[in-house]
Amino acid sequence: MIFCRRVALPFLAAVFALFVSSANSASRVALVIGNGDYRHSQPLANPANDARDFADMLEGMGFSVIRLFDGDFAATRESMRAFNLQVGDAEVALFYYAGHGMELGGENWLIPIDAELKTERDLAVEALSLKTIVQSVGRATKLGLVILDSCRDNPFAAKMTTSKLTRSVDRGLARVEPLQNVLVAYAAKDGTTAIDGTGRNSPYTAALLRHMPEAGVEVSFIFRKVRDTVLTATNRRQQPFVYGSLSSKAIYLRESGSAPAQAAATTSAPSAAQQATLTRADEDVWSTISRSSDETLFRSFVDRFPNSTHVRDAKERLQVLQAAAHCLGSDVATAERARSTFGECEKAIAGDPGNLRLVVKGAQAAETSRAYSKARELYARAAEQGNTVAMLRLGSLYESNLAGPPDYERSRSLYVQAADRKEARAATRLGHLYEDGKGLERSYAKARFWYKVAAQLGDREAMSRLALIYERGLGGPKDKAEARSWREKASERAPKAAADPAR
């Protein structure tokens, strides 16, 4: 038995070198926080999705991940303590945050969901200092990385009791100068705000999910690719930025594929005991990776276990992941491109029917390519699972005559469901339905109600319509002060002209 174990060990090492062992996990640690369900301010739709998807991606890359979703201050403090215990032994320490953040007097703060921030002095006891986080990841021996998708418009500034310092709190985060071997990546350049996005993920996190898992790409270049992707996705309105500098030594979050480790040489066929050991390894590895979304794991499995009963499953899973990558990464701006994308999305959905990102992207591709009945079917599937984008788009299809006669009542019902989940555009569509009397009894009072819901959630179009309704006294008394207030808020949210990159 001792001889059999010695022969089998190289085979096991060749396999498990590609997977997350406890030692490898300890060398790469991460804390991922996503805050969206704020108790005392405007909620955010995407951070929970962003953080979950980002954490899943990191685990597929070999990180040991601490997750915190919608954390209050106490939970945030405890997660930082747990993270700090791991960082001391780590080569790479990564902190990711999606949610509200703000700057005060040159210092940056990340905001837990229970923060009230009635005065600027509350920041120190209700929020998490970016300076503390930078110091924490800086203890890693190779790389400290802080990624912040938190530069959205600050909802606390208007109600905070102010001093001279507070005038800068409503325009994103301030520039930082991190320690040696630390990079701090902002979703938007200091002093500017980021876009929360209309899909499952924000534009910034969507770009991170696309580029960070790429093998053989040096870490600095990953963020250059993320920058270009976000600039394109936001029509150059949002420019990510990275602060800090590294040494001349290249650092990779995922190395390029290397040649398979060689098994110990032997001139005889494996014994029954050896074969049993290899079979156990085959089963153990498959049970570990079978639900992964990392293509490299399945390629490596096929290479190392060509006679496994799971090889066919691994190849099928690889095909699904490749189709999913094409589906999620492709453009659906034109009907021609959308038709090609839809074919890949269908393959991916068939292999992973519970993945709502695939279902929604497939529905969008079907809609753009004018396959409206199929789009309706896929949106309905995602809407049943609580996806607000799908509710909104499905409601729009029922409102139109693109997939059959309009069904305004069903459209209204879908918009209400989405609006109840804080989808501002759905509340705006309800305002339009009632204002126009589209398939419903015209009611300016209900239009006013839904426009106000959408405006309070930050929808600029609703702010403009609400201003007009107050000005004309539709559905209630005239109120010129309210009209002026909402018109000013709408103006403040008007897209800023993109800076000329050549200047």
Image: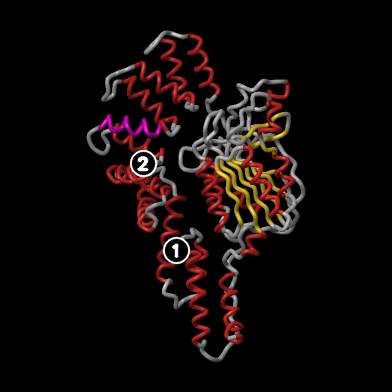
Assign a secondary structure to mark 2. helix
Image position of 407 with respect to 299: above or below: above
State the residue lying farthest toward the right.
Answer: 180
Q: Disc 2 vs disc 1: Cβ atoms closer than 8 Å?
A: no
For the residue pair 43 and 392, the one nearer the viewer reads as 43
Q: Position of residue 421 (x, y in %)?
A: 43, 34
Specify the quadrant that holds the N terminus.
Answer: bottom right
The residue sitting at 45% across, 50% down in the picture is 328
Sequence order check, earlier mark of 2 and 1 = 1
Q: What residue is pinned by disc 2?
A: 383
The residue type indicated by label 1 comes to Leu
Assign a secondary structure to mark 1. helix
- Region of the chain picked out in magenta, as a range: 407-419
Image position of 470 with respect to 416: above or below: above
The residue sitting at 32% across, 29% down in the picture is 412
Instruction: Answer left or right for 434 relative to 470.
Output: left
Image position of 163 with respect to 280: above or below: above
Q: What residue is pinned by disc 1?
A: 318
Q: Position of residue 147 (x, y in %)?
A: 63, 45
How are the residues colored? secondary structure
Instruction: Answer left or right for 273 relative to 102.
Output: left
- How far apart are the two marked residues, 2 and 1, measured between alpha carbons? 28 Å
Q: Position of residue 330 (x, y in %)?
A: 44, 50
Instruction: Answer left or right for 444 relative to 219.
Output: left
